[in-house]
Amino acid sequence: MKECRPYFFDDDGTIPNNPSLPLLVYPGVLESAEGDPGAVKRLLGRHKWKGAWVNGIYSYPHYHSTAHEVLVVTGGSAEVQFGGTQGEQMQLGAGDAVVIPAGVGHCRISSSPGFQVVGAYPEGQSWDLCTGRSGERSRILKNIRSVPLPERDPLSGEREPLLRYWE
């Protein structure tokens, strides 16, 4: 399996990000993913990442305080900003994957025609949708700290490389 790259983001006052878990980018990890979201959904399911869906990425900053998330690009490409408005903009294309820890903001800046991702969450985790609105912060910080680590990496099905960075 190809390596992944970790990225840490600070709390920006609106998007909390995650104080201890890095976002992990897996460039070109599933070159066979292009055009086959069904195969990606089955792979993630075998590795205990459930609730898989096929769509795009919201075009506004958001995050999940109750679940980690994996996104696998199966079509087109997109410029995605992670970590809030002061975070990192990254170009993602078919075969790239990103594992987003609870609390880390993400937002699609632009995309090509046909941009598509498969997303999923670790088994037993249910996602919420947070955008940094006033009033949500008091509950979400506790939520983020309480989200358990997944049992295994969504792409390799093993503990590595995800848990090497997250434990």
Image (spheres, grey):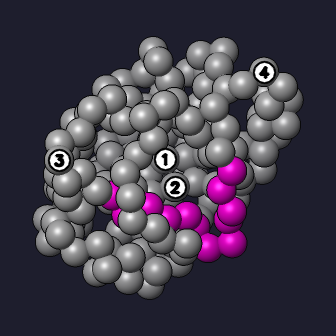
Q: Give the residue type that dot 2 points to.
A: Glu
Q: Is residue 13 above or below residue 83?
A: above
Tell me whether the residue at label 2 lies in contact with that at label 1, contact meaning CB atoms closer than 8 angstroms. Answer: yes
Q: Helix or strand or loop: what does disc 2 sit on?
A: strand
Residue at image point 38% right, 76% down:
41
Residue 118 counted in the magenta span: yes
Q: Find the magenta span and give its range.
A: 117-128
Residue 47 visible to the viewer: yes
Q: Which of the two discs, 3 and 1, sits closer to the camera?
A: 3
Q: Give the residue type that dot 4 points to.
A: Ser
Residue at image point 17% right, 42% down:
112
Q: Give the residue type that dot 3 points to.
A: Pro
Q: Is residue 161 above or below residue 42?
A: above
Q: Which of the two discs, 2 and 3, sits closer to the camera?
A: 3
Q: How many marks?
A: 4
User: Disc 2 or 3, which lies upstream in sequence?
Assistant: 2
Residue at image point 68% right, 65% down:
125
Q: Which residue is mark 4?
A: 134
